[in-house]
Image (spheres, grey):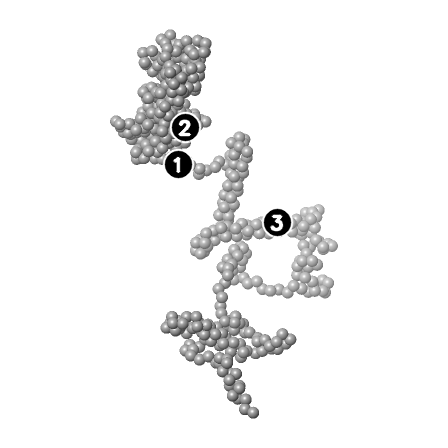
Amino acid sequence: MRPLTELETKTFFEKLAKYIGRNITHLIDRGDETYCFRLHRDRVYYVSESVMRKATSVGRDQLISLGICFGKFTKTGKFRMHVTCLDYIAQYAKHKVWIKPNGEMPFLYGNHVVKAHIGRVTEDTPEHQGVIVYSMTDVPLGFGVTARSTSDTRKMEPTAIVVFHQADIGEYLRQEDTLF
Amino acid sequence: MDVSGVLEAHKQKFKSVSVEGKVIPVEYDLGLLAAYDQNPVDEAELKKNKEEYLHSLSRDNAQLLFNEIFQLQTISDDNGVMAILPAPTTLLPREKPLPKPKPETRWEKFAKAKGIVNRKKERMVYDDATGEYKPRWGYKGINDDGSKDWIIEVPAGANPMEDQYEARREAKKERIERNEKRRQRNMEEAAVATKMDQKAVNKGDRPNMDNARSLKRKEIESQILISKNSTASAGKFDEAIKGDLKPKGIKRQFAPTVTDLSKEKAGNMSILDRVVGKNGEDLVNVRKAIKATKRQ
C-alpha cells in the first residue's frame, strides 16, 4: 500500500473526470473525515485515514483489500474503473442515462445499451462522455460511455448502440473474485 | 678659461645619480631587473601631494636600480654596451603541481624491500668465443637464445628424438609470454593505484590483485549495461540471454504511506486543477445556450 505517484494520480483523475468532472474535489475534500487514495497491488482504493492507518499494520502479502476499490491500473499504465466505485460516481455524476425495465437485464449481463432501451438521457450529453446508467427507479446499474451525442441519437435506429458498456452491478456476481 | 661654472650649471639641470634617505637598503634582483623597496611610505606626503610623491619615489628607486646595473660587468659590441645580468634570485612558485610518483611495479617493490640496487653495466662485453666486444643484448648481442648453436647436446633423461632447437624456441616463447603477463598485471595494478582515493594512498595501502580484477570487472559490467540499453528499443525487445546482467540499483521512490494528508490533499488538488482546468467546466453550456436563443 502506498500513495499514488503524480503520474498515476493524473491518469486516475483523467479517467474519473470523464464521469464526475470537477466533482472529484468532493471526494478529496470531504467534510466528515479525511479520505485518501492508496495503491495496493495495482488497485486504487478510496479509504479513510483511520482505516488506512490501521491497514499499515497488515503485511503487504496479507492485505487483501481496504476501503473502496475504484479500479486498477493495467500493465500498460492505463486506469480501468471497477463497478465498486459506482456509489461514489453515481452521487456526483454529470451525465446520466435511464434505461427501461426491459433493458435492465441485457445491460446487467454486460451488453451495451441500445437505443430502444433508453428511457431518458441527460440533455446535451456529448459523444464519448462517461455516463452513469440508472434504472427507471433511479437505481444505479453501472456506467458506460456514450456512442453518440444526444442530438445524434435521435436519428439512429432503435437497435443502434447508444451507450458502450463499461461496468455494471452484475459484475459483483460475474467477477466476484477479482473485483475488489 | 674657467668652464667649471658652465659645467656646474649643466649639472644643476639634472638630478643627482645618488639617492639619499633610504633607511632600509633597497634589495635588488638584477636577473629580473627588479628592485624591492621595503621603506615605509611617507603617509603625510602621500596625502598632501600624491602624484608628485609617487613620481619621485619611483624615480629614486629606478635610479638606484640603474646605479646597480651600471656596476655590473659590461660587454660592448656592434649593438652597443651591454651589462651581463646575473641569474635571478627571486623564487617563483611552480606553475603546475608536482607530478605524482609513478606506481611501482612488483619488481621495483621487491627490489626496494630487499635493498637491490640497479648497478650500471657496460653495454659492450668481451666475447670469448670470437675475441670481440659484443653488445650485452640486442642486435648481434651475446644473449641469443642458443638457437644459433650448430650442435646441441641432448640433456640427460631427455628424449633423443626430440628437437632441442625446437625446445629452446618453445622455452623462449614461454618466457616472453610470462613477461608479457607480468607487464599486463603491473599495468592493471598501476591503474587501480591511480584510481584509489588519495586517503588510501597516503595511508600506504597497496592495490592488490583482487581489487584490480574487481575494478576491471565493474567497468566492463557497466559498459555491458550501457550497450544493452543502446539499442533502438532501449533494450526492451532484445533477446534475453541466460545469466545476463540485469541493471541493479534502479529503485523507484514513493511517498511514505502515512504522511501529512493535508499536504497530499493539496497535491491532489493541484493535479486536479491541471486535469480538469482551474475553473472546471464552463459555467455556461455554449451549445445549449445557442439552441435556447434559436428557439426564441
Q: Quadrant of residue A175?
A: top left
User: Mark on residue B177?
Assistant: 3
The quarter of the picture where the C terminus of chain B appears is top left
**Category of crowding for the residue at label 2, using alpha-carbon neighbours closer than 10 angstroms: few (below 14), some (14–19), many (at least 20):** some
Task: Please state which amino acid type lies under the numbered disc 2.
Answer: Thr
The quarter of the picture where the N terminus of chain B appears is bottom right
Return the x and y of residue A51 as percentages of the image width and height: 28, 28
Q: Note whether A5 is above or below A156 in the view shown.
A: below
Residue at x-position 49% and y-position 59%: B97
The reply to whether residue B234 is visible in this rendering is yes
The reply to whether residue B27 is visible in this rendering is no
User: Mark on residue A11?
Assistant: 2
Q: Are marks 2 and 1 on the same chain?
A: no
Q: Are marks 1 and 3 on the same chain?
A: yes
Q: Secondary structure at mark 2?
A: helix
Outermost front residue: B296
Q: Are marks 3 and 2 in contact (CB under 8 Å)?
A: no
Residue at x-position 54% and y-position 55%: B105
Outermost top residue: A102
Q: CA distance from mark 1 to mark 3?
A: 52 Å
Q: How many marks?
A: 3
Outermost bottom residue: B1
User: Mark on residue B253?
Assistant: 1
Q: Quadrant of residue B249?
A: top left
Q: CA distance from mark 3 to mark 2?
A: 64 Å
Residue at x-position 48% and y-position 74%: B59
Q: CA distance from mark 2 to mark 1?
A: 18 Å
Q: Note whether A102 is above or below A60 in the view shown.
A: above
